[in-house]
């Protein structure tokens, strides 16, 4: 069964193998003892809808399939922007961008501006190449206005799809507008360096709704009010407009508009018929409607919610449900679990809160969702958990900004999950029940434990490696740890795009740069995208590890290879270094924009003249010459930073998009294409094998 398996992860405790089971899916699951398949998502209209249909079609009448909406928070806005909003409101439409000086933005109720979108590029991804954004951020405040006056510089970076002219952002990138334009501009006056991290990390054509203030409220408790109606409508219209912009054929555009109106009118009807409806229930209804439009009315999809699956109303529920294996380990082996959890986070390089145990007191990576009734509505309130577990004064404390602190005294050690839940149930404080839910890692570990298995899309869940490490760490001390597997679904959107035939796409700038065309047929795109990505990957591998000063020499090497200068001078040293890394004249044939090459030539020549003048005057060289040299070197570094961003956007976005397209956008373009993607999808299983 796993003779053709590939080892994808390994440490001293385990190795994880991955094998293709597309043609033997049911028998593979049966051999592994799988009796239920779960698939959870925070946005059912993203890749979830199609991947759910892949599983539904293959599992129907064979193995139970439970698709569910993961009851997460709406998202996380940038808290630093709060003082700068000029309008009232509780929510805001945002783009995704990285941490560092601007605050993290996390969106999950989102949509893409058409089929093609660019993923956010984390600052760590630049750092892996040894290009540090701090090189640019440090002097951005000093040089920004000078750079704005340099029209040739502006044209050069615009040709690479980059600008800080927010009013022209859509025009230059051929994607959507800048979300929160005025707010960001006001904030970056206060924090100029933050603008560098924002511009170099932000997604392209990827929008979502987030609360302005941090909220510990799940999607099942956020009822759609007038403000959310406007935001949801605007989000959908962004997706429609982007799709129309990327499709050239007028007949196809009319079809897209017709389907968009159908979805819009159906959604409008839901909001009229159900005066009190949550985001979770609204999303489920829309997803079910789209599924019926694709596969027909005979399809019976029944989406669950995390809070429903894990809900406990009585002690009998606990006995009936088997979702607390790892929480039981937390209570029985607290120190072991804490060390394993922390080690797993370290190995996976995830910036999540570690577990600290002091005097038997700790906060496990779990929370309680409390079911309550308020003004006729069911409200889920998320509470953090603190446990003190010793032999004299044990307690359980629930707390959060939306949950008044409650302490339950046990008086003696809580030895297992049964005793933990007994304390809560016997308190009689939860008349409407509660759900005990693990945070990202523990939740996934629980949902993929045999005889269950969890399914995720390819490129989905950055926590999957962490779970493997956690299991390996635990296995060293808990010998009877149960097996754990993961299903991966590959939709292969771009590989299958040729099925749309002669349909012509208008590409956003970050793709047309290296595809080499602004307009391209679906068939040609499908046949060529992988080879284009390989060329970009080769360039990235060559420049990886360069120091700041070496980019000055890199400029000369590129110009020399393009026949624009004759003498490399001391830059031969770097050329030899690149040849040792496997360089084979890739720069000579790479499609650099003409403006990029022209600007590098102009700036390097200016720098050469200034350096010669400084050497000539020595100690008598005026200060302005040193400053001008410094500015020119900053410009070269900045242009290369923009170039690197363009490479990362192209490479990472296409590979990600191949596996994680927005289902609702594909539905607008062609429902028939979705059925083809379902039939052509590949299925893999990841199996953790312990060495211990």
Image: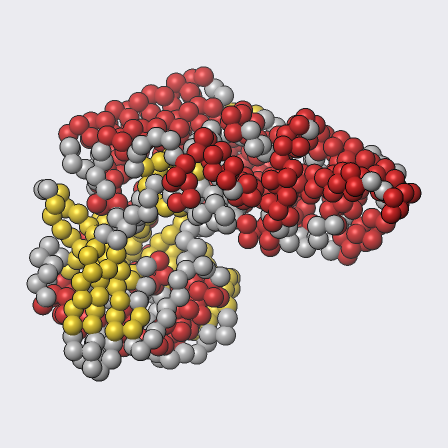
Whether residue 513 is visible: no
Q: Is residue 379 left or right of residue 257?
A: left
Image: 520 above or below 633: above
For image coordinates 81% across by 35% down, the residue present is 606
Counting the numbered discs, the total is: 0
Q: Quadrant of residue 652?
A: top right
Whether residue 131 is visible: yes
From the viewer's side, name the closer residue of 145 and 478.
145
For image coordinates 27% across by 31% down, the residue present is 227
From the viewer's side, name the closer residue of 667 and 392.
392
For image coordinates 26% across by 45% down, the residue present is 219
Image: 216 above or below 179: below
Quadrant occupied by the N terminus = bottom left
Residue 146, given in percent of the width and then of the height, sits at 66, 32
From the viewer's side, name the closer residue of 145 and 532.
145
Q: Quadrant of residue 428?
A: bottom left
Residue 387, given in percent of the width and then of the height, sits at 25, 70
Image: 9 above or below 252: below
Q: Quadrant of residue 313?
A: bottom left
Residue 577, given in percent of the width and then of the height, sits at 78, 55
């Amino acid at each position: 069964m796993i003779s053709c398996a590939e080892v994808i992860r390994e440490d001293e405790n385990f190795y994880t193998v991955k094998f293709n089971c597309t043609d033997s899916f049911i028998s593979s699951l049966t051999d592994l003892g799988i009796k239920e398949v779960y698939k959870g998502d925070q946005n059912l209209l993203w890749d979830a809808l199609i991947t759910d249909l892949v599983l539904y079609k293959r599992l129907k009448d064979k193995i139970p399939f439970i698709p569910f909406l993961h009851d997460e928070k709406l998202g996380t806005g940038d808290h630093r922007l709060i003082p700068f909003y000029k309008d009232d409101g509780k929510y805001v439409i945002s783009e995704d961008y990285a941490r560092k000086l601007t605050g993290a933005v996390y969106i999950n109720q989102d949509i893409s501006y058409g089929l093609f979108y660019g993923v956010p590029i984390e600052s760590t991804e630049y750092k892996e190449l040894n290009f540090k954004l701090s090189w640019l951020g440090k002097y951005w405040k000093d040089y920004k206005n000078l750079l704005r006056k340099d029209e040739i510089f502006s044209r050069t970076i615009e040709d690479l799809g980059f600008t800080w002219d927010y009013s022209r952002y859509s025009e230059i990138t051929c994607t959507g507008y800048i979300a929160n334009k005025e707010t960001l501009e006001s904030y970056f006056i206060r924090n100029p360096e933050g603008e560098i991290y924002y511009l170099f990390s932000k997604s392209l054509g990827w929008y979502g709704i987030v609360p302005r203030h941090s909220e510990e409220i799940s999607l099942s408790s956020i009822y759609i009010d007038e403000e959310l109606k406007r935001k949801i409508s605007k989000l959908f219209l962004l997706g429609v407009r982007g799709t129309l912009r990327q499709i050239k054929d007028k007949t196809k555009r009319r079809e897209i508009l017709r389907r968009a109106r159908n979805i819009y009118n159906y959604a409008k009807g839901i909001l009229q018929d159900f005066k009190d409806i949550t985001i979770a229930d609204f999303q489920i209804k829309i997803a079910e409607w789209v599924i019926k439009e694709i596969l027909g009315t005979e399809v019976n999809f029944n989406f669950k919610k995390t809070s429903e699956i894990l809900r406990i109303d009585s002690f009998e529920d606990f006995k009936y449900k088997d979702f607390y294996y790892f929480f039981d380990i937390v209570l029985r082996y607290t120190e072991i679990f804490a060390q394993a959890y922390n080690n797993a986070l370290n190995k996976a390089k995830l910036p999540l809160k570690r577990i600290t145990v002091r005097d038997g007191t700790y906060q496990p990576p779990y929370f309680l969702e409390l079911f309550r009734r308020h003004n006729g509505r069911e409200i889920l309130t998320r509470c953090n958990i603190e446990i003190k577990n010793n032999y004299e004064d044990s307690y359980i404390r629930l707390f959060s900004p939306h949950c008044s602190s409650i302490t339950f005294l046990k008086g003696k050690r809580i030895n297992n999950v049964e005793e933990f839940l007994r304390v809560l149930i016997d308190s009689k404080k939860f008349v409407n029940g509660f759900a005990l839910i693990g945070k990202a890692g523990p939740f996934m570990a629980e949902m993929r434990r045999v005889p269950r298995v969890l399914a995720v899309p390819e490129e989905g869940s950055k926590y999957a490696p962490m779970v493997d490490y956690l299991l390996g760490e635990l296995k060293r001390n808990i010998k009877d740890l149960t097996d754990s597997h993961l299903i991966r679904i590959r939709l292969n959107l771009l590989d299958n795009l040729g099925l749309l035939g002669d349909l012509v796409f208008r590409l956003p700038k970050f793709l047309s740069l290296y595809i080499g065309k602004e307009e391209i047929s679906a068939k040609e795109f499908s046949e060529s995208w992988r080879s284009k990505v390989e060329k970009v990957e080769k360039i990235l591998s060559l420049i990886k590890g360069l120091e700041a000063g070496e980019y000055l020499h890199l400029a000369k090497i590129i110009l020399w290879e393009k026949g624009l200068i004759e003498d490399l001078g001391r830059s031969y040293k770097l050329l030899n270094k690149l040849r040792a890394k496997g360089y084979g004249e890739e720069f000579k044939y790479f499609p650099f924009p003409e403006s990029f090459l022209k600007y590098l030539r102009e700036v390097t020549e200016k720098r050469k003249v200034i350096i010669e003048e400084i050497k000539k005057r020595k100690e008598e060289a005026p200060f302005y010459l040193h400053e001008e040299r410094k500015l020119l070197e900053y410009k070269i570094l900045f242009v290369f930073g923009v170039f690197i961003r363009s490479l990362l956007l192209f490479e990472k976005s296409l590979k990600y998009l191949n596996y994680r397209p927005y289902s609702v956008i594909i539905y607008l373009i062609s429902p028939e294409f979705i059925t083809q993607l379902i039939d052509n999808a590949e299925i893999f299983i990841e199996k953790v094998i312990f060495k211990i």
